[in-house]
Amino acid sequence: MADALIIIPVFNEEATLNQVLVEVRRAVPASDILVVDDGSTDRSPQIIRAHPDVHVARHDTNRGYGQSLITGFRHAIDGGCAVAVTIDCDEQHEPQRIPDFLQAIATADIVSGSRYLDPTLPGDPPPPDRARLNREFVARLQAITGYALTDAWCGFKAYRVEALRKLQLTEPSYGLPLQVWVQAAYHHLRVVELPVARIYRNPRRHFWGGLDDADARRAYYLKVLEAEVARWFPDRVALVQQTP
């Protein structure tokens, strides 16, 4: 495999998948691309097959966004890649920015996109529940990890694969980034944020697994974060429940 592996988690993305694959290949013509098809039931598999230069890992059933990333990370590690870049397939990330992430990872272990770091960038207003939960969990993560994060959830990231080898990631759903941040702090990884545009093509896009309700999502995030902090920083568990 190439030095950089571009990981694209996919679940029923037939409306946007072809364009995203075209734009990613244009942005990084020399990099390997891996689509992790998380049990799609639409035309996504046929669209992927129309791109013979794209590698595919397929889950027979839907296993979750986090598990798709874990599968992609395993391919990056086993394939001897130096860097793994994750980018979503819903057109909320701009593939032409991938080279910026590859450049920034030269002096970091994790480069994370942030839709809130640079308020001067043009962008769509975030759905209110997502903005509220991001503010709350950014404050918790800052207290727990010491990282000056501004965006807890952005899926546009670059990782040094040698850093990924240190992480023990198990969360199959949307709470996976919470594991990443806590374990990154435990291993003293160098984390930087890169400002990215805030794009919401479909602000009503569903969260799978019964997490459309913001209160249910918040309770789930708190459960994941508390378990992860208890595992790696048991002396900081009280910070999880403190009001930010």
Image (cartoon, rainbow, N blue to C red):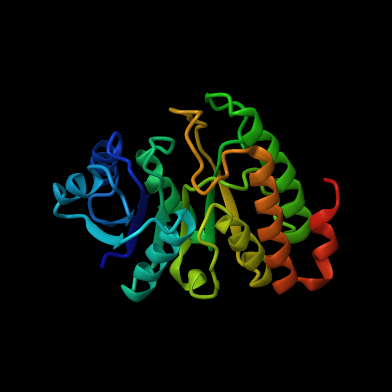
Does 135 sit left or right of 124 as displayed? right
Q: What residue is drawn where x is 67% and y is 48%?
A: 149
Q: Locate residue 167, reporting x and y percent.
A: 55, 71
Q: What residue is drawn where x is 16% and y is 55%?
A: 53
Q: Locate residue 201, reporting x and y percent.
A: 43, 27
Q: Locate residue 65, reporting x and y percent.
A: 46, 53
Does 20 sit left or right of 223 as displayed? left
Q: Quadrant of the N terminus?
A: bottom left
Q: Quadrant of the C terminus?
A: top right
For the residue pair 185 and 132, the one nearer the viewer reads as 132
Does 145 sit left or right of 59 as displayed? right
Q: What residue is drawn where x is 25% and y is 59%?
A: 56
Quadrant of the rendered image containing residue 191: bottom right
For the residue pair 163 and 207, the one nearer the viewer reads as 207
For the residue pair 21 and 243, the one nearer the viewer reads as 243
For the residue pair 163 and 59, the one nearer the viewer reads as 59
